[in-house]
Amino acid sequence: MKDNYFIIHGSFGSPFGNWFPWLYNFLSDTKEVYVPQFPIGVGYQNYENWSKLLKYYLDLGLIHENTTIIAHSIAPVFVSKFLVQNKIKVNKLIFVCGFNNYLGINKEYDTVNKSMFFDNLVDVKKYSDQIICYYSDNDPYVKYEVEKEFADAIATEQKLIKNGGHINSESGYNEFYEILDEFNPTDEEIFGDFKLEDAIWVNNYKVRYLFICFFIAQFIWYFFVLCYT
């Protein structure tokens, strides 16, 4: 089965919010990417309804050992619970601002979140060998200690984003460049036969893209010079 990716939003969210469209555009040029819209709102968002939708993808054979799941906010604990209950092994889990057994955001969020929680969170480690947890030190919705506890319980690697808030649009994250480390393509994929293994910027996406843009701009400039002189 070929590699594929799922991006899963949080409570009252959508595939079109935060950095999800940006990441979809980055991945979908060369990868198979799914960004489901889960039911949201009081009376609609709960574990049963969300699991029915994800089970649809599972029954189609789209969630498997080569699947990477990127999940934000309440979605990490939902995904963990789903994998444990369905005993599904996946390639990699990338969790952003995940938490478990935490109430106190507000009445509506607490209502839609509480069915997602479960006690045997650590069991998710049986179903993925790579669990990366991103979280921040100033999330206005979920306490730092709660997100850190979530990561400590399951992560194979933790990444703290300083002053990242809830790592969403509200905190300035319409793009999330840090997460690109999880999808780092080879130099051959980006540059073909042009080798840059020893360049200090080879793993810095922003600098790579600036370099490429500069190269294209130079090419266009030379083209006009040749044509009009």
Image (spheres, rainbow, N blue to C red):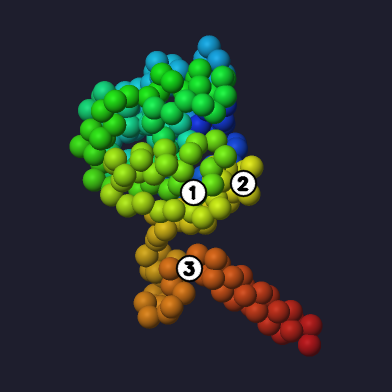
Q: Which of labels 3 and 1 is toward the front?
A: 1
- Residue 69 at x, y = what percent? 38, 40
| CB atoms of marks 2 and 1 within 8 Å | yes
Identify the residue shown where x is 29% and y is 40%.
153
* Amino acid type shown at disc 3: Asn
Left or right of 14 in this view: 100? left
Disc 2/disc 1 C-alpha distance (Å): 11 Å
Identify the residue shown where x is 43% and y is 72%.
202
**Which residue matches tag 3?**
204
Residue pushed farthest top?
43
**Which residue matches tag 1?**
136
Q: Nearer the viewer, residue 44 or 216?
A: 44
- Residue 39 at x, y = what percent? 52, 20
Determine which quarter of the picture holds residue 211.
Answer: bottom right
- Residue 22 in sight here: no
**Which residue matches tag 2?**
171
Q: Quadrant of the C terminus?
A: bottom right
- Residue 165 at x, y = what percent? 56, 46
Q: Which type of secondary structure does the marked residue at label 1 adopt?
A: strand
Q: Nearer the viewer, residue 224 or 154?
A: 154
Seen in the picture, residue 134 relative to 186 is either above or below; the reply is above
Identify the residue shown where x is 39% and y is 44%.
148
Q: Quadrant of the N terminus?
A: top left
